[in-house]
């Protein structure tokens, strides 16, 4: 092999960096904050954080996992809420996290109204993008959500899933718990 070839091959090597990290992806409505039901949280004053989520985030941080929120927000695409309002609501999440001395790596949202949009759960686009942006190891990661579309998005991204719901509906999730209060202890076992 000529020296020119060696140089070319070296350039094609993946950029080195820190090792990939596992992550816990959290759905937002019904996990991070109290579910608004079939509608949307359209105003910051209607956003109510779930304290057990902060406890779950603490476990996630302590175990060295990244933490990312992955949320469909079609209300923006439907014109029911401005992107600026969504940013205000997400600033509240970040403030609450910082006030506890915790770390949330990122928040991804999809405002698309089209179910075929690659980012709209159950499509896995946001998880795949987060994995590239934050160097995440999807095979060691978990998706936590209250809907089966969260479970499906997690599985399609190559993650395992936790479903949090009182539904008796069948779930493909590896773990099913009825209440957010059970999540911190479950993550202590899983991570
Ligand atoms: Mg939800």
Image: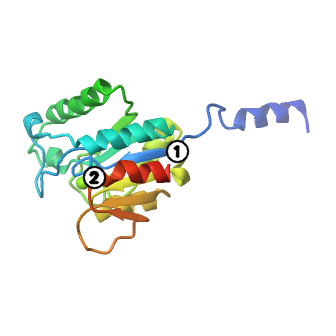
Residue 191 coordinates in the image, percent (x, y): 50, 48
Q: Name the residue under label 1.
A: 22
Establish whether ligand 1 lies closer than 8 Å to the Cβ of label 1: no
Tell me if I can see residue 26 in this picture. Answer: yes
Establish whether ligand 1 lies closer than 8 Å to the Cβ of label 2: no
* Quadrant where ligand 1 appears: bottom left
36 versus 12 height, above or below: below
Query: 153 left or right of 135?
Result: left
18 versus 136 height, above or below: above
Give the quadrant of residue 79. top left
Q: Mark 2 points at which residue?
A: 180
| C-alpha distance separating marks 1 and 2 | 21 Å
Q: Are marks 1 and 2 in contact (CB under 8 Å)?
A: no
- Earlier in the chain: of badge 1 and badge 2, it is 1
Residue 142 coordinates in the image, percent (x, y): 45, 53
Q: Which of 138 and 174 is in front in this view?
A: 174
Query: 125 left or right of 78?
Result: right
Q: Which of 1 and 153 is in front in this view?
A: 153
Residue 133 coordinates in the image, percent (x, y): 47, 37
SS label for mark 2:
helix
Give the quadrant of residue 121. bottom left
Instruction: Tell me, for residue 120, which label it has, or none.
Output: none
SS label for mark 1:
loop
Q: Residue at x 22, y 49 (%)?
A: 29
150 versus 16 height, above or below: below
Q: Nearer the viewer, residue 5 or 104?
A: 104
Give the quadrant of residue 174. bottom left
Quadrant containing the N terminus in the rendered view: top right
Residue 22 coordinates in the image, percent (x, y): 52, 44
Crowding near the residue tagged with mark 1, few <14, some 14–19, many ≥20 C-alpha atoms within 10 Å: many
């Amino acid at each position: 092999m000529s020296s020119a070839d060696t140089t070319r091959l070296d350039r094609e090597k993946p950029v080195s960096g820190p090792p990939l990290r596992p992550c816990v992806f959290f759905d937002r409505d019904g996990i991070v904050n109290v579910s608004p039901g079939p509608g949307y949280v359209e105003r910051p004053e209607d956003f109510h954080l779930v304290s057990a989520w902060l406890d779950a985030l603490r476990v996630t941080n302590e175990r060295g996992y990244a933490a990312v929120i992955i949320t469909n927000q079609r209300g923006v695409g439907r014109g029911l809420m401005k992107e600026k309002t969504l940013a205000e609501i997400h600033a509240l999440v970040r403030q609450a996290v910082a006030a506890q001395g915790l770390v949330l790596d990122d928040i991804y949202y999809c405002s698309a109204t089209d179910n075929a949009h690659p980012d709209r759960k159950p499509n896995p686009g946001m998880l795949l993008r987060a994995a590239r942006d934050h160097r995440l190891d999807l095979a060691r990661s978990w998706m936590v959500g209250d809907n089966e579309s969260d479970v499906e998005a997690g599985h399609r991204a190559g993650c395992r899933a936790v479903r949090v719901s009182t539904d008796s509906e069948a779930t493909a999730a590896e773990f099913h718990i009825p209440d957010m209060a059970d999540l911190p202890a479950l993550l202590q076992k899983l991570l």
